[in-house]
Image: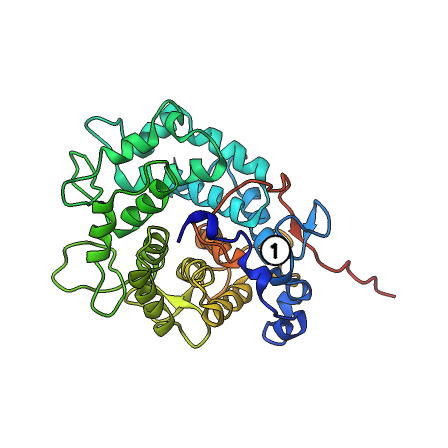
Amino acid sequence: MSTSALRRRPLRLLAISALALTATLPAATAAQAAAPAVTTPASSTSDDATTYRPDAAAAGWLARQLVDGDHFESVFDGTAYPDQGLTVDAVLAFAAAGSADQAAARATAWLARPDILSGYLGDGTTEAYAGATAKLLLAAEVRGTAPSAFGGVDLPARLRSLLTPSGRFSDRSQWGDYSNAFGQSLALIALQRTPGGAPASAVDFLAAAQCADGGFPVAFGQATCTADTDATALAAQALAATGRSAKAKAGLDWLTAHQNTDGGFAAAGATASNANSTGLAVSALLPGGRLLGGLKGWSSLVKLQQGCSADPAVRGAVAYDASGFNPANATRATAQAVLGLSGQGLAGLSAHGARPSAPTLACPAPTARP
């Protein structure tokens, strides 16, 4: 499937009424259900400051969590470190929601800083990381910046230099090769958007990694092929984008067969649904035409979103799972959930036309007590 064939808002095409959705959602999310994303164009909000759309509300909350307004950090042993990967996730989320474009521009500028860039991609000679390069290349394409001169780095050329004779995109590092199916899939999606397209050998390599049951593993070359939800969601999108429809279909079949009764998806080795895996799965299912499974997953994400009954500071955020809101993992959960809430895949994602503001969830005004 070519990227031009992918519609920007596939959920607009679905004849799902607000009333039907409201019947499936808890009271805390009634404000979102009153005007669900399935009937609202990307550019439509109640105004620039508030929104009824779950994806835009989640993106707005995410933008307000950025450190210094332009990046995310992770804390290890009490020390905060820049988290370029999570920042890229946020940039993709902002584009998917069609909002928070000012925050996305600041985050993109931060990612292009030489010190930040080399810390994420490696120096390009002794150290070069395939997955990070692929992910950043995709973000640059989505933002509409020149990927061949991103922070002084030619991202497509750097990524192609990491292609091995086997067709695998591999790390060049003194610390070993940690490349996996995530990076391979992102590389195919990103390079397919370049004039040269994705290398056939790389497409063949990913296709050959498919397990007998149709799913895809995270790690290549394992004695037992064990499929993973996240890896399968990304691989299905990559193979669809590069014309391997049968392989992509088998991946989508695996996803629908492994959907939980609550509509969500679990990580490998787990049983409980989580927002991260569900967001990625839905972003593969809906563009792939699996509307029933995709909508069930979308509904499960909305149920995890903090609605009007929550503290105003967390409204719009998406909890990792049904155990409740946890600030420690909500940022990453929300970033990946937005892809599912928007119903968009990565192959055709674009920030073009995104609103600059970071809206809050529209909620009824408090009723004054007599």
Provide the secondary structure element on which disc 1 rests: loop
For residue 217, side relative to residue 43 (left or right): left
Direction right: furthest residue: 370
Out of 205 and 340, give the one closest to the viewer: 205
At x 45%, y 55%, the residue is 333
Q: Which residue is mark 1?
A: 315
Asked if one can make out residue 124 in the rendered structure from this viewpoint, the answer is yes
Out of 79 and 120, give the one closest to the viewer: 120
Q: On the rendered image, what quadrant is the C terminus found in?
A: bottom right
Q: Is residue 231 above or below residue 263?
A: above
Q: Is residue 18 above or below residue 198?
A: below
The spot of residue 20 in percent (x, y) is 63, 75
Q: On the rendered image, what quadrant is the N terminus found in?
A: bottom left
The spot of residue 202 in percent (x, y) is 23, 46
For residue 217, side relative to residue 8 (left or right): left
The spot of residue 312 in percent (x, y) is 65, 54
**Amino acid bearing label 1:** Arg
Q: Is residue 356 above or below residue 334?
A: above
Neighbours of disc 1 within 10 Å: few (<14), some (14-19), many (20+): many
Out of 9 and 114, give the one closest to the viewer: 9
Q: Is residue 368 above or below residue 128?
A: below
Question: What colouring method underlies this structural image?
Answer: rainbow
The spot of residue 179 in percent (x, y) is 23, 45
